[in-house]
Each structure stands twice: as C-alpha cells, then as structure tokens.
Amino acid sequence: MAGVAVSTTINGDSVEYLCQPDETLLDVLRDRLGLTGAKEGCGTGDCGACSIILDDRLVCSCLVLGAEAEGRRVETVEGMAHGEKLHPLQQKFLEHAALQCGICTPGFLIAAKDLLAKNPDPTEEEIRFGLAGNLCRCTGYDKIVRAVQDAANVMKGA
Amino acid sequence: MNFDPRFSGRKFASVGTRPIRPDGVDKVTGRARYGADFNMAGQLVGRVLRSPHAHAIIRKIDTSKAEKLNGVKAVITAADLPDLTDGDAGMYDILDNCMARTKALYDGHAVAAVAAVDARTARQALKLIEVDYEVLPHVTDVDEAMKHTAPVLNDAVFTEGLEQKPVKPSNVAKRTQYGHGDVHQGFAQADFLVERSFKTEQTHQGYIEPHACVASVSSDGTADLWVCTQGHFVYRQHCAQLLGLEASKLRVTSSEIGGGFGGKTHVWAEPVALALSRKAGRPVKLVMTRDEVFRASGPTSATSIDVKIGARKDGTITAAEATLRYTSGPYAGMWAELGAMTAFACYKLDNVKTVGFEVLVNRPKTAAYRAPSAPMAAFAVESAVDELAKEIGIDPVDFRIRNAAQEGTRASYGPVYGPIGIGPTLEAAKHHPHMKAPLQVNQGRGMACGFWFNFGGQTCTDLNIGMDGTVSLAVGTVDVGGSRASLSLVAAEELGIDYSHVKAIVADTSSLGYNDMTDGSRGTFSSSMATISAARNAIKILRDRAAQMWDIPVDDVVWENGQALARGEKYGNLSPLSLKEIAAQSGKTGGPIAGHSELVADGAGVSFATHICDIEVDPETGATRVLRYTVIQDAGKAVHPTYVEGQYQGGAAQGIGWALNEEYIYGKDGRLQNAGFLDYRIPVCSDLPMIDTQILEIPNPNHPYGVRGVGETSIVPPLAAIANAVSNAAGVRMTHIPMSPPRILAAIDAERG
Amino acid sequence: MVEVTLWGSLAAIAGGNSKVEVEAKDIRELFRKLAEQYPGLEPWIDRGIAVSIDGTIYRDTWSKELPQDAEIFLLPRLAGG
C-alpha cells in the first residue's frame, strides 16, 4: 500500500511524515514519531488514554487517521510543560497524587486542559462530566477531581 | 541477618509525610515507559490466533499458508512450546493456557501465534492459519457446571478433598472446609435465623494498560524480556521453565505498570513472545488488544454462595455456615477456598463452618483480583448479617460490634488473632458523621465490613550511598501505586536524611536477588522491611568509616539523625560526621558504602475495613446513584498517607463498579459478548462522588514501623455495603451482583407482586 | 512436643487427625517430621503450606522457632492480588 504524505503541526513544531491510509494518528504518534505519551488502552475510543487536542477539539487519537492530521494542529501531553516548568495541571496532579499507575494520566491531563480552556471555573459536577470520557482504574477519581479544581484556581489567578 | 522486625514504637521524621513521588514528573510529562512504550531494533510484531469456540478439540492446525506469506518470520503452535513442566501440574496449566495443546477450553484460548514485519502482515497471517475444530458442548455457569449432566472439561479431574475418591470425573476440582465448633448445636440455640443464596458475576481487574512485552532470544540461550508485570522475577522463573532457558540468562525488566490489581501476576503472552522470538531469531513485540485482555487474561470468579446465620435475641451470633462455589476457569484454583477462609473472618464465632467448591467452566483462567475471593464471600455474609440485625431489631453497626473478632478470638479460618482492627473500624463508623446524615426518599444507607490476610514474602533490596551523600535504593517489588515514594521515605527515616536525597528504582532480574511479586498487599510492607534492614546494614558501615576517620573504636560511634556521633566525654572535641561527610571520604576509608538485605518478610498483619455508603434508587428504572461513600481502614502505619488514601479510594471504586455494573456476559454459544470498555462499563468520573477516607493506625507488631498491607482490603466491603444500601433504599433484599438496573427493577417488581 | 492443627484437606491425608503432636523446634523440622509420619503430606508441603504461630502467618520462614506452648496452625499458601 502506498504511503500518504502528511504535513502537520505537533506541539507547535512542523512535522512531516508518511503513513498508511488505514493507520491511526495514535499509531503514527507512537510508532513513527516516538511520542509515546498517548497510550492505547482500548483502540475503540472508550478509555480516553490516547486523548489529544486536534485544532482545539479533544479527540481520541485512536479514532483519527494519521492522514487526517494534514494541515491541522495536534497537541499531546509532551507539549504541556515549557522546558522545566510544568503546566499547573501537571504540578497539581503530582501534589494531589492524582495518579497511581499513571497510564491514564496523559489522557486526563489533555482532557482537563481542554476542559479548563473552555470552562475556566468548572463546578465539581462539570469536572466529573467533562472527564467522563477518560477511564482511571486506580484512583476512584477523587484526587483527580481535586487536582483539576486546584489547578483551575491557580490558572484563574495567573 | 539478625534483623529484628519487631515494632519499636519510634517517633517519625519522614514516615507519615506526603512528598511528591520520585517517578511523578515522568508520568505527567509522558516520558514514563510502560509495556508498549519500548522498542528494539529489528523487532517484529507478534499476534495471537484465538479459539472462537468455548470448548473444542483441536484436530489439526495447518500453518503452511501463513508461513508462506511475505513478511511472516515465524508461526508457532503448542508444538513449539514442548512440555518441560516435569510433572508440575500448576506449571502445565500455565503452559496449556498460554497455548492450547489438545483442546480449546474457552472463547479466546490461544491456539497459534505469528511474528511478522508489521501488524497488517501479522493480522493477514492469522487469517491464513487453518484450525480444524471439533466443537464440544460447553458450560459457563457455576451452578450448571456442578450438575452431573454438565459437559466435563477435563476427564482427569476427580474432586479432591472428599472422604472417598470419586469414581467419575467432574468439574468440581476440589472441596475444602474450614471452621470450628458445632454449627447444628449453634443453630439450635438461635432465636433468629437468616438463610439466603447469593450470586455474583465474573468481573475483570480492568487495568487500563493491556498486557505488553518485547522479547528477544539469542541463539546462545540468552534472552531479554521487557514487560509490564507485578512480578518480573516470577515471570522470569515461569518463562525460563516453560521455554527451557536458564533463569540467570533471561533478564526481565519490569516496565512502568499501567495497573494490575492481581491481573499481572500471571504469564499469558510472554512465553508466546519468547517462543516467537526464538523461532524468528529477532525481537518480538506482543501487545494484547482490549478484546484479548477481556477474553484471554485472568478475570475473577463468578460465584454462587449459600449463607445461614443464627443469633440469640440479645444479638449474639450462635452459629454461621456458608457454602461457596467459585469458578476457576478451565484449571483448578484455590478461589473458593480463599472465600471459605475469609467469609466469617470479621466475627467471633463459637460455631462456624464454611465449605468451598472449585468449579471448572469454559471461561478464561481465573486470576487474582485484589483480595481475591473475599469480596464475594463478604457480600453474601454481610448481606445476611444486615438482614439478621434487622430481624432481631438491633442497629447493624451495634450488631457487628457485639460480634466482632478481637485479639484472642479464634478466626473462622483457624488461628487465634493478635491485635486487630475490626472493632476500632466499627467504632469509628458508629461515630462517623456520615452515619447521622439525613436521607431523602428512595435513598438508603448501607455499611459492611471486610477482611484480608495480607502477606509478605521473599524480598531483596540494595541501598547504595553515592560519594555526594545521596542514596540510591534498588528494590525488586514492582511499584504499582507509589511504593517508590514510600520506600524512599523509609530509607530517609532510617538513615536520618532528607527524602529528596533518596532515589528509589525497581531493578531488573539480573541486578538484584529474587523477589516475590507485588501481590497480597506486600509491596510496601515487605520492601520497607528490607529497606530498613539494608539501611541498618549501611549504618554499620558508616559507623565503621566514621571510626576510621576519627581513629577511635567503632563501638564508641553511634548513629543519630543522619550523623555519626562519638560517644563518651573523652571525645568531647569531635564534631559529628554527617552521612555526606563520611560518603565523601569513602574512597579513602574502604571503598563504596552500601547496605544489602535479603529476607523473608513474614508476619504481615491482617487487615480490616468498614465502609459506609448512601445510594439512591430510581424505582421506575432501577437506576442507582452513589451519593456518599466513606472508607475506614486500619493501615498499621501509613508511610505515605496520600497513597494509602489512594488505595482506599481505588479499591472502593472498583468495588462500586463490581456491585453496580460490571459483569462478563456470555451468550448461549459460550462466547463473551461484552469484551470492551463500552459494554463492560467500569465507573467513570461522573458515576462517583468524592470518596472519604479515615486511616486507623493499629501497629502491626511484626514490622519495625508497624506497617500492615493496605492495597487489597478496600475492595472487600463495597459489594455488601452497596447491596445493603440498595436493599434499604428499594425495600427489597438484593441477592445478585451486579445490581444493574434490570436486576433492581425485577427485584422491586417481584416484591410488589 | 508441639501440637499442630491441620486444616480440613490436610487432616484427611493425616489419617483423619485434625490435631497431631510433633517433636519439632522450628518450621523446617516440623515439615520434615510431618512428611515422615504422613508421607501423603509431602506433595502438599512441596506445593507450599503456611504456618500460623500464635496468629501470625509465616509462609517462607522455615527457620522460625516453634515455642512449646504456641498455637500452631497449618494453612494453605495464599494467593493475593
């Protein structure tokens, strides 16, 4: 099968790659570009571990084709920190121990970033529904919700 | 050697604080490497062909067409994994489960595997493998499988544990019994009796990371395995035995693990990946799909349980009895036995009897799931206890307090308890504000208790002091939820230095002595014991080096608060030497300073919890909502309280999912119908409230800091606590888990007539 | 001499005795003497038996001493999650 040439922007950098027409964006990120922050928990869009932001929209990268990234902007967990400085969500996830095994964490961080971009002052219920597309099996979500609340407060003050 | 594990009652500087975990930044930046995040040069993609039948004889497998496909580098069947188990029945079951030998025993059972240059070629190759099956009748239900008319899975299985050896093979692999006293006499003294039957459905641990590994076998017999596992040393032993490799030549590196909960204590794909790599002569990466994880890893048992409890008018239980039937998949296990041991462990009983039956069914091989087998037994027992309290007219908490086990009580599984925490968790529940909060219409409150043994096991730890005075700690127990943080705290505590100067890692199997896996809530319990021991060994050397630097006898040197002190008035002019100062001189005083420890961490303290929850039931639809949830549990000593809370909350959330939603649904054809997170629905963020926790600390006398395991017990009470809450809200006793809306509605309708 | 209580399945193999008396100073000697007295127990010991001494469960410390008046219980080796 002939490859598809794609030009896109990932975490602010121009990137070009060849991919198969049936290859998911998740596979491109992980296997071709070495960006393994996004995880495959299910491959069917049910767990959110592969969450990325595509042109300001939160998507499961396992449900997007690599070819569809042509001319668009992709944001992954690898782009959240600036040099040594963590994003407030990353910092608060650490402080609140909002991760145990950590496999769902990149997806939650991206989903929470998207949520706070659209709703900087969410209620607990809005956070819970906003993150309902991401599965975590370790924490019971309590500390994740608290971390997002705390990060929202920090970001409002910034 | 000569390590004294007894609780010393010391004051803590580091232990009990809540610093950020050492592996944290990597995990929030996407840098941490899990099972599927690792690659080797020239690696192939492995894929497994699985049986579509629940029960079938494999007459013939023709792999010739697949082998001829361009890009296919190896195709294997059971013939490529010859039986090297040498009469070890448990290992033979593992081998047969990794790759079916003569029969496919469940939907999803591996029958062949390929390694190819890419995923597409591997998938194509699977389609070219021709398997000739003779489909047999199957059975998936626990009660059906026990009937004489049920299809027998294994003609060589005759029920163990009966007084007379049975003449016919059966699906009941084993009968076990526990208890003491005379239950008939006890029931005769009872004024009130409750007798009920319960069922629970099969659930999966539901870790978000599928099983994944990269295997590389060289022609000289050396091999490397990168894998997500709860126990890389155990995986090494099993893989080496099944593949005929020397254990010391197989280096297993545990990746970061994306959840296990007991499900990553067992090999499935790893021997297959090694066999593929050996045949292909190249590294092979094998990652399970979510569908494969559900079909072909190790979920928990489905159960059927009968309970009978009697009590006097004054609220004293006179006798208790339970019969527990647990599925173990197609291979014998000890799951019903664990249920039989734990069922009544919370109570002080003069007359108690439990009988367990291990039942073979055409479902995947049962694996451990967090306090394995205890949640189902607790569901049945705690439901009956609640009902009995109601019949007698006693508050359910007071009823439990009255009958709670205490120090000196003979446990229902045999021994007499030392100091335990069931009474204190119940007292804490009784006085918790949650118990007094008002409830609205259609809302119910439930509570329940739970028990788990916890255990320790073989542990090996290395502590190395760098010349800059910082400490690297190499442990062999996989970190499943923050143990590197707690073990760093323990090293800092024992040495008397700051947490930030300790860095803990999980070492591979070639860098450290054998460690049992992280199961049985042992990670922090046993590795902290080994870390304390290693630190004390290092302190001996530090004292010796300080003595050299001062040129005084080592007996005159003591270690306090991270520094060596010269004891005695004659040394009044010697200022203390810090760890850092001693480390800086180590090259001139005898070389590197390290502490090593190898021990068996026995004496883990049993653990108890009491949970309280409020549930709202919609009587029109049967839908439920968890309004409030409180966990009270004894930790012995919480080394890093935030991660202890995390264990409590996570266990409760898994229990909530099990109680209300999660179940394996099999069709009449014996195939799993919901092998994905869309149809096997685990709790999401909007399903749950905050989960409040209360940590009690009743020191374990067999650990220097009083630590007990905390990981598992929190999943034991939720099934029962929620069932009691739903029963109180709906006004009808729920006896079948999960309490999905159709089941609740059916129960309400049946009650209304 | 210590008195050892066997759980149900083991008792059946030990001639139906749920309590047996053994002259043993530690767990290792206990297992050796039990295997001598009841050869049927040997495969069980190989598979793994835990020993409860006064309520504390030992799975692997075969050097653990058995106090004369201790309560000693044999239990199956446990699995965990």
Image (cartoon, rainbow, N blue to C red):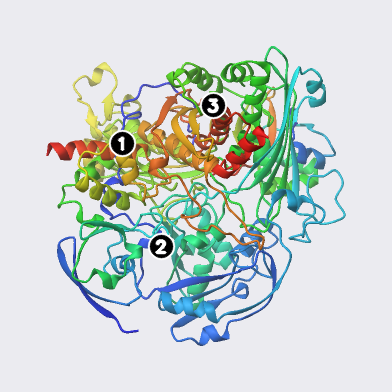
Helix, strand or loop for disc 1: helix
Q: Quadrant of residue B190?
A: top right
Q: Kindly report which numbered mark, 1 or 3, lies closer to the viewer in this rendering.
A: 1
State the image coordinates of residue B492 (x, y, percent, origin top left): 31, 34
Between residues B523 and B207, which one lies in front from this camera angle?
A: B207
- The circle on residue A124 is 1
Residue B675: mark: none
The x and y percentages for residue B189 are 79, 17
Q: Which residue is identified by label 3?
A: B447
Q: Nearer the viewer, residue B367 or B270?
A: B367
Residue B346 is situated, as x and y percent measured from the top left of the image, at: 61, 26
Which residue reaches farthest left?
A158
User: Disc 1, disc 3: CB below 8 Å?
Assistant: no
Say which chain tag 3 marks. Answer: B
Marks 2 and 1, Cα distance to the nearest angstrom? 29 Å
The answer to whether residue A145 is above or below residue A134 is above
Residue type of the residue flagged with mark 2:
Gly
- Residue A43's disc is 2
